[in-house]
Image (cartoon, grey):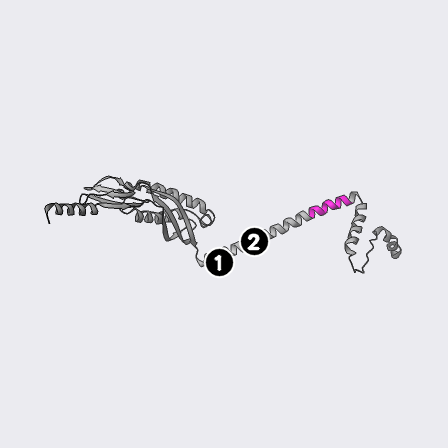
Amino acid sequence: MGPVTILVIIFAFILLTSLRVLREYQRGVVFRLGKVIGVKGPGLVVIWPIIDQMRRVDLRVVTMDVPPQDVITRDNVSVKVNAVVYFRVMDSVKAIIEVENYLYATSQLGQTTLRSVLGETSLDELLSNREQINAKLQEILDRLTDPWGIKVTMVEVKHVDLPEEMRRVMARQAEAERDRRAKIIHAEAEFQASQKLADAADIIAQHPIALQLRYLHTLSEIAVENNSTTIFPVPIEFLKPFFESAKK
């Protein structure tokens, strides 16, 4: 084996070990003798052995689950809350050189932010104002991770685990609220009906013939098929002579 052959083999080995393939969603941060020289990819990338090092960065959206956190709300209710964080790397160089492990750092930051934000809200706000809480969490995380070249696109509170005794209290509260609404609706219906009856009485007082028409309408309702009952409305004035003779 001659010197030329050895050189060709060495050159081929160096060439093969210096080639890297980056996918469309990947970028490579290249360090030359410890100094960042740029970002390469996607596609075929040449890295000089020994003097160059490359760190791969995934640019796809990362879905990170925040494990359940014990939170004490502003009104001193202990709950367990978990969430999910959606983020992606916008600056590959910052994600590598500004933080040791951006995935772990974002996870820890999401846990602490979740506890601090929910600790400032009451239980009713946590259950009813979920969209506002999600927006506040997203704004805080996005601001804190911006120096790392990370963009937090969405934060969603997934589940709120209430203690069993709190569930029973809320169930009784909801039942009492439904009873209260039912009583209010019934009272309003009685009030409206009394107003209509009062208006009808005023109209009949002004037009006595309307009472006779009401009698006839009642007869038409009673006189259904196969009904042998017959009712004749008699004005009370016709009975006054009989009452007076009975008193004598």
Residue sitting at x 80%, y 48%: 213
For disc 2, the marked residue is 178
Q: Quadrant of residue 179?
A: bottom right
Report whether 7 appears left or right of 227.
left
**Badge count:** 2
Residue sitting at x 31%, y 48%: 103
Residue 171 placement (x, y as % from top left): 51, 56
For disc 1, the marked residue is 168
Which SS type dominates the magenta stretch? helix
Q: Quadrant of residue 89?
A: top left
Residue 215 placement (x, y as % from top left): 79, 51
Mark 2 Cα shell of 10 Å, populated few (<14), some (14-19), many (≥20)? few
Report whether 35 appears left or right of 154.
left
Q: Is residue 181 above or below residue 91?
A: below
Q: Is residue 196 magenta?
A: yes
Residue 18 placement (x, y as % from top left): 21, 45
Mark 1 Cα shell of 10 Å, populated few (<14), some (14-19), many (≥20)? few
Secondary structure state at the residue bearing disc 2: helix
User: What residue type is disc 1 on?
Assistant: Arg
Residue 127 placement (x, y as % from top left): 46, 50
Q: Rounded to the nearest whole Å, what is the CA distance between mark 1 and mark 2?
A: 15 Å
Magenta-colored span: 194-204
Q: Is residue 141 above or below residue 248?
A: above
User: Camera-side residue: 95 or 45?
Assistant: 45
